[in-house]
Image (cartoon, rainbow, N blue to C red):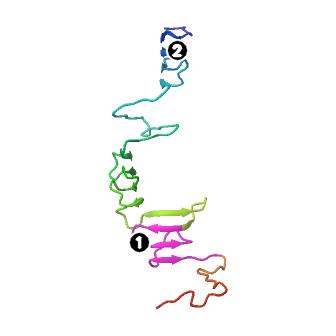
Amino acid sequence: VAGQTADIFRIASSSGDYLFNFTAAGRFGIGTTSPYSMLSVAGQVVGQNFVATSTTATSTFSGGFSAGNNAALVVNQAAAANSLYINPSGNVGIGTTSPAYKLSINSTNATDNLFQIATTTNQGIFTVLANGNVGIGTASPTSGKLQILATNGTAGIYLDTPSGFASNLLDLR
């Protein structure tokens, strides 16, 4: 209704608690007197299927999200390989819908970074590629299965024998 500032429609319980509230701003509230978005629900919402859509190709669940009763949680289900999948056992899969371990990361591209710990400027501190190469101090370990890149004159590998250590600290055969 044009020019309306008060709530347009309300249903309250006999004790005065709002059950439904439709505001002049076009917001609908269930269990709340002040809906903050198009639909606001005070309390739990139970449904078989929730679909979040957006014209910008992103959807947001704010304030937390929970999937229970041993159900899987899937993020980006429409992608060729799910972005994130948590199975009922709690195993997490990235790029796979059947994670065999607590964290399973899969890729079909051998040069993808499967796992990386990096600085704030995205310099690789520890990197694991899909082909199995591991890099320490490099984001692109291409010189062997283990590549250690030392900088600023520091040792790439430093071994210190603790006092009282009787045998070889490193034995290469």
Q: Can residue 22 be seen in this view?
A: no
Q: Residue 132 carries which label?
A: 1
Q: Main secondary structure of the magenta part?
A: loop
- Figure check: 5 above or below 70: above
Q: Residues within 10 Å of mark 1 (few under 14, many from 20)?
A: some
Q: Nearest the camera: 88 or 26?
A: 88
Q: Does the magenta stretch include residue 46?
A: no
Look at the picture and state if 30 lies above or below 53: above
Horizontal and vertical percent for residue 67? Answer: 41, 41
Give whichever of discs 1 and 2 has the lower sequence position. 2
Give the x, y percent position of residue 95.
37, 56
Q: Residues within 10 Å of mark 2 (few under 14, many from 20)?
A: few
Instruction: From the viewer's side, name the closer residue of 25 and 97.
Output: 97
Spatial CA span between label 1 and label 2: 61 Å
Magenta segment, which residues? Answer: 126-151
Q: Which residue is drawn at 52% across and 22% down?
A: 35
- Locate residue 50: give its quadrant: top left
Amino acid at the residue labelled 2? Asp
Residue at 52% x, 20% y is 32
- Give the image quarter of residue 114: bottom left
Q: Which mark is residue 83?
A: none
- Element carrying mark 2: loop
Indicate the amino acid at tag 1. Answer: Gly
User: On the rendered structure, is 125 left or right of 133?
Assistant: right
26 relative to 162 in the view: left or right: left
According to the image, label 2 marks what residue?
17
**In the depicted structure, whether residue 44 falls above or below residue 93:** above
Q: Is residue 130 left or right of residue 116?
A: left
Report whether residue 103 is seen. yes
Q: Does the magenta stretch include residue 139?
A: yes
Q: Is mark 1 on a helix, strand or loop?
A: loop
